[in-house]
Amino acid sequence: MDRLFLSPPHMSGKEQAYISEVFESNYIAPLGAFVNKFEESIKSYTGTSHALALSSATAGLHLALRVLGIEKGDVVLASTFTFIGSINAIIYQGATPVFIDSDESWNLSPELLKKAIVELNVKPKALILTHLYGQVAKIDEIVAICKEEDIYLIEDAAESLGASYAAQQSGTFGDLGVYSFNGNKILTTSGGGMLVSENKEWIEKAKFLSTQAKEDFLHYEHREYGYNYRMSNVLAAIGVAQMEVLDERVQRKREVFEFYKKELAEIDEISFMPELNKSYGNRWLTTLTFEKVEPMKVINALEEVNAESRPLWKPMHLQPLFSDSKVFVNGSSETLFEKGICLPSPTKSTNHDLSRVVEVIKRLCS
């Protein structure tokens, strides 16, 4: 049996042609027409006013904190149920992460967010909110809290490009938003990210910092330090082609989820990640929890039929790196980590391919 990967790249068919255009132009460095085209395609799709193509989503989060003036000793709130890339940028800035647990949506709990703000003895400067597995968090409530408390909101929409709430795209509600184009995301440039905002000055500042903070001189003049964070024109060409089929990829991801949900509907012990009212998730990965069967037993059984699966994110507050960090918990993310897995969710797969997964789960849960 062919390997059934978790979320492999799925090319549109135009990537090679666009890359050929890049090579013909000889603009293979972090400059060129396709970088501009990629940024324009993101702005057009998401409805945001300004976008900056970068080497990774982590770079985007780092630049977001930098342009907002987050410094050593500042407190930055963050989702605990997430990938470490969401948190590393806080460490880069020497700031202090404070972790917030999930609620029934699996995403960050607005109630615990309010509790953290009240009980911390230092006012938080910002919140990095992760939209988990392509599902939008309770963004209306969270935006309201951040505005009321004068806290910057950075949306980690790395997993949720194409997801929306009340017809507005994830990543566009906060002060800044970040998307990822890593190899396993819903669209990929092999590696890359995008920083978006309605604030032109922030994006211009991030652009300046992302190109080594070079001043506007013919020679190399530097008054502050920057980074080598821009995306190459070659990767941007791949991104332009991928954006042309983003809606198709979202639709297929949702079809994969619906197939699993329908085929496993009779198994009472299974619960899938919910989708909030008024939201439309991209279902980047189909995720579920088991009440009786050990998740690793499922993962190992799927491996026997050459199907890749993985545990849900291990919460940041359980990571040895953050063992001394402040956290506001209710047990939700720990339970999800103990009971949940991610199922193979490739957009290239057929329902026949996915049946291999269904049969294993039905057998184990019978």
Image (cartoon, rainbow, N blue to C red):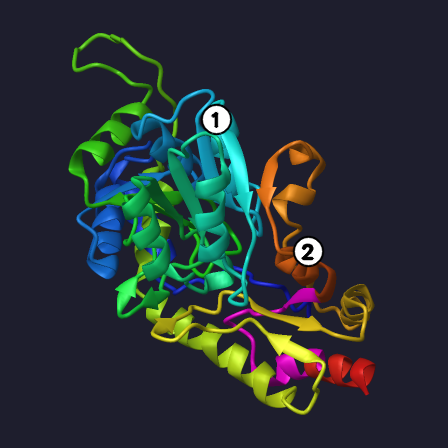
**329 falls in the magenta region:** no
Q: CA distance from mark 2 to mark 1?
A: 25 Å
Is label 2 in contact with label 1 (beta carbons under 8 Å)?
no
Q: For residue 349, what is the image quadrant?
A: bottom right
**Nearer the observer, 188 or 198:** 198
**Magenta residue span:** 340-357
Count of number-bearing discs? 2
Residue type highlighted by circle 1: Ala
Residue 321 versus residue 221: which sits nearer the camera?
321
Q: Position of residue 14 (x, y in %)?
A: 34, 61
Q: Residue at x 37, y 65 (%)?
A: 163
> Relative to 180, does residue 61 appear above or below in the rendering?
above
Q: Is residue 13 above or below residue 117?
A: below
Q: Residue at x 24, y 55 (%)?
A: 41
Query: Residue 172, position in %: x, y?
Result: 28, 53
Q: Which part of the image, by quadrant, shows the C terminus?
A: bottom right
Q: Secondary structure at mark 2?
A: helix
Task: Tell me if 237 is positioned left or right of 293 in this view.
Answer: left
Residue 347 lies in the magenta-colored region: yes
Corner quadrant of residue 219: top left
Judge whether 309 appears above or below 120 on screen: below
User: Is residue 9 found left or right of 152 in the rendered image?
Assistant: right
* Residue shown at the point (35%, 64%) measured from the top left: 162
Q: Give left or right: position of 339 versus 151.
A: right
Residue under pointer 1: 95
In the rendered image, the quadrant that contains the N terminus is bottom right
Q: Which residue is mark 2?
A: 334
